[in-house]
Amino acid sequence: MAGNSFGQLFKVTTFGESHGPAIGCVVDGCPAGVPIDLTFLQAEMDKRRPGQSRIVTRRDEKDQVQLLSGVFEGKTTGMPITLLIPNEDQRSNDYDHLRDAFRPSHADFTWQQKYGHRDYRGGGRSSARETAARVAAGAIAQLLLRPLGVQIHSYVSQVGPIATTNNYRELDFSNIEQTAVRCPDLVVADQMIDYIHQIKKQGDTIGGIVSCCVQGVPTGWGEPVFDKLQADLAKAMLSINAAKGFEYGSGFGGVLMRGSEHNDLWKDGFTTQTNYSGGIQGGISNGMDIYFRVAFKPVATLLQPQESINKSGHPVTLEGKGRHDPCVVPRATPIVTAMAALVLADHYLRALALSAAQKGV
């Protein structure tokens, strides 16, 4: 099994390589009758696409989505939805020097060892280019969730040492798209952008954190034991290229608290005074905001010399060529949103199925 599919009832399979003719996905299990807003879908793609600002890769992909199946007269038919995204600006010769060499901290070595044959042009399918298909699928999931009032807000909360508040309630989400770095704290956003420019001039890269707040999820989504909602969110986020850590609710900070401080006490019926649980208890949504953070490592390709090895295990010196992100998090925010939407859409349909079964439908 190659692990190219995600989800149970709302299932997504992605296909294609970074320097192939196209990438895309098939979304299966989406109910019929969901209105498809192509303007919204393309807007989500534009948030992820390369070449959108001076702090991301200059690869010039328009990421115009072609809808091939599963939609008729503007609504889903209940059949598989096929979305195709042509690759238009490949420069494969930028990767000729990697035909027999392994870049440090890339998937080159492990893919070679696992499959015995790899597409070295931009990493092939291990490239973050694959995530464009996820964003397209995630847009369909968001449109499914839209009538329910579910809203997903992903934003950059940290770049290197520069961070905004961890309290999402203090932030204005309407500011997220106001800056190239997608941090809703506009003062901190300017500092982040300046810092990324400094790193880029040095031919280096830097990591960061994408935070996410999901509002409007009702009580009861998620399955106990192995398919807990936070477990599926964690798998979704850690499947994103360069993701290195996931925490939800109080996260690792909770270890500093006592139970008397950490427990979410009830108020006003079925809401809580605090939300250290991050909107999930026992693996099931409790109706409060779901919030989590995803840590991303520095991009592995550097525009400076680094020591590495070739297929024979002999030392070589490599220096990145082509167009690469100095910091991945500005373009990772729509990917985090998409993966959260895919998880929630799947659990929404599972909750519906359980409800129908309980009613004997």
Image: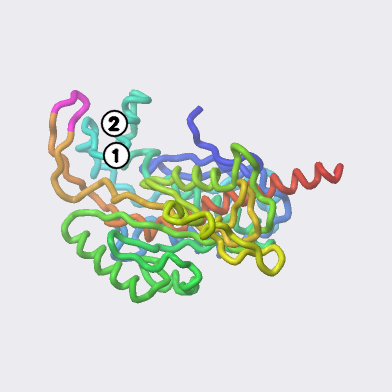
Question: Disc 2 designates what residue?
Answer: 109
State which quarter of the image contains the C terminus. Answer: top right
Where residue 99 sits in the image (x, y, percent)? 24, 33
Residue 335 visible somewhere in the drawing: no
Question: Disc 1 designates what residue?
Answer: 106
Q: Is residue 312 magenta?
A: yes
Q: Which stretch did the figure color magenta?
A: 309-314
User: Looking at the image, how many numbered discs can be counted on the residues?
Assistant: 2
Q: Is residue 356 left or right of residue 77?
A: right
- Which amino acid type is marked by label 2? Phe
Q: Which secondary structure, mark 2?
A: helix
Mark carried by residue 152: none
Q: Are marks 1 and 2 in contact (CB under 8 Å)?
A: yes
Q: Nearer the viewer, residue 36 or 22?
A: 36
Q: Which secondary structure, mark 1?
A: loop
Residue displayed at 30% across by 67% down: 192
* Residue 182, above or below 236: below
